[in-house]
Image: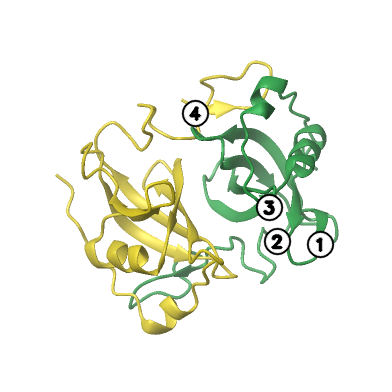
Chain colours: A green, B yellow
Amino acid sequence: MPVSTPIAATADQLSQVTYNTDGLVPAIVQEAGTGRVLMMAWMNDESLRKTLETGRTWFWSRSRQEYWCKGETSGDRQYVREAFFDCDGDTLLFVVEQEGKGACHTGEYSCFYRAFGPDAGAAAE
Amino acid sequence: MPVSTPIAATADQLSQVTYNTDGLVPAIVQEAGTGRVLMMAWMNDESLRKTLETGRTWFWSRSRQEYWCKGETSGDRQYVREAFFDCDGDTLLFVVEQEGKGACHTGEYSCFYRAFGPDAGAAAE
């Protein structure tokens, strides 16, 4: 079973993250090892701190207006191995160890399972 | 020199993309081969169509309120090899061949060159 590893972010690093007018920042989740992009979801300041402190991904659900820890119900947990912020500080990237059936609520491993194009469909699978 | 390859998206695929209240959708750009996440920027309906039709990445600049084709000025072009939309249709993923010095305007190869953590810094480089 994977181990949770907190990341001790500095105050300077955290201050460089910028949030939109709703107080949110997009967070890309990529699988360690495979490099596969699994999903994108939104974090606010508090869910970013929870993510770094617990070593598990915490997001803010815009539709439900609540925090959710990925996989807490489904068992498809994400253990954070590396965390980055981009040049403008307005997008985050988490490299995770994905547990269980994957990241997508549809049952697909990645949320990006549909490709554009004539012979597309399950091309990303 | 890389070749541009248009992607013939179907009307059904395009109709499944959802835009936010500003008419925008986040677009993640990942490097083909390495799997490295290079950047995230925004597209509107028109820039998505341009991207698929030209095989080069086109974004909408929120600050300048104009279309920009990545690398048109700098030479650091992105040639689209695969394009995906996620389960909710509200995030896009482009797998590209990155030309030149990389994707970031700072001169770093990826925009995600800063890691959270005590020994962080150029950890993503």
- Total labels: the figure holds 4
Residue B1 in view (yes/no):
yes
* Residue on which disc 1 sits: A74
Query: Could you tell whether A35 is left or right of B11 in the image?
Result: right
Mark 3, mark 4: which one is toward the viewer?
3
- Distance from the alpha carbon under mark 1 to that under mark 4: 32 Å
Mark 2 on the same chain as mark 1: yes
User: Which residue lies at the image location 62% right of the left edge and 41% below the top edge?
Assistant: A94
The answer for which chain carries disc 4 is: B
* Residue on which disc 4 sits: B113
The answer for which chain carries disc 2 is: A
Compare residues A36 and A8 and report the one nearer the observer: A8
Q: Secondary structure at mark 3?
A: loop
- Distance from the alpha carbon under mark 2 to that under mark 1: 9 Å
User: Which residue lies at the image location 66% right of the left edge and 21% below the top edge?
Assistant: A12
Q: Position of residue B10 (x, y in %)?
A: 36, 80
The answer for which chain carries disc 1 is: A
Question: Residue B31: which numbered mark, if any?
Answer: none
The answer for which chain carries disc 3 is: A
* Residue on which disc 2 sits: A101
User: Which residue type carries mark 4?
Assistant: Tyr
Q: Earlier in the sequence, mark 2 or mark 1?
A: 1
Query: Could you tell whether A47 is left or right of A120 in the image?
Result: right
Mark 2, mark 1: which one is toward the viewer?
1
